[in-house]
Amino acid sequence: MKESETFRRSFSRVSLAWAVYLLLRSVFQLVVLLQHSVDAFVVVNVITNVPIMAGLMVWSVSYITKQFRNSEEWGWALVAAEAAEDIADDLAFEN
């Protein structure tokens, strides 16, 4: 799987997005720290980092899942897995 084009392309884009975020976050933190107090730095970090990081995590998982689902290489496997899960849910519901 790691040698597949879908894996390489998807994880490269997600890694690039995280690298850009972390770089911009570091620059922003440095600017805040140099121009404001340590208290302001801590408040800004708490307010901005958690929502942005959570959003980026959600995007990362959904983007990679979508890429694999839509790929010709791996789409069939996800469709089969989802079908098997639906069948298992139906059987569990009946019992």
Image (cartoon, rainbow, N blue to C red):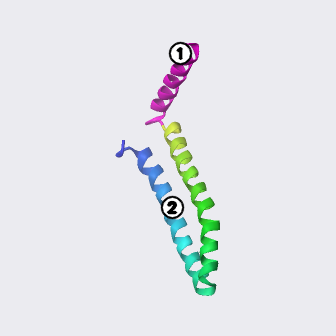
Check residue 44 for magenta coloring. no
Image location (x, y in percent) of residue 65: 52, 42
Place residue 24 in its image quadrant.
Answer: bottom right
Q: Secondary structure at mark 2?
A: helix
Is 37 drawn above or below residue 60 in the view shown?
below
Q: Position of residue 9 (x, y in %)?
A: 45, 51
Q: Is residue 86 magenta?
A: yes
The residue furthest top is 95
Choose the circle earlier in sequence order: 2 or 1: 2
Mark 2 nearby-residue class (10 Å; few <14, some 14–19, many ≥20): some
| Residue shown at 49% from the left, 65% from the top | 19
Which of the numbered marks, if any, corresponds to residue 18? 2
Residue at the front extreme of this rendering: 39
Amino acid type of the residue tagged 1 in the rendering? Leu
Going 56% across and 71% down the picture, which residue do you hit? 25
| Span shown in magenta | 72-95
Spatial CA distance of label 2 from label 1 is 41 Å
Return the residue nearer the eye: 73 or 94: 94
Q: Quadrant of the N terminus?
A: top left
Q: State the residue in front, 14 or 56.
A: 56
Kindly identify the residue that appears in the image at 60 percent across and 77 percent down. Answer: 41
Please state, as top left, top right, bottom left or bottom right, where the C terminus lies in the image. Answer: top right
Q: Secondary structure at mark 1?
A: helix
In percent of the image, x 55 and y 23: which residue is there?
86
Counting other residues with Cα less than 10 Å from the Cα at mark 1, is it few (<14), some (14-19), or many (20 or more)? Answer: few
Q: Compared with residue 40, is residue 22 higher up or lower down, i.e. above or below? A: above
Specify the label residue 91 is tagged with: 1
Indicate the amino acid at tag 2: Trp
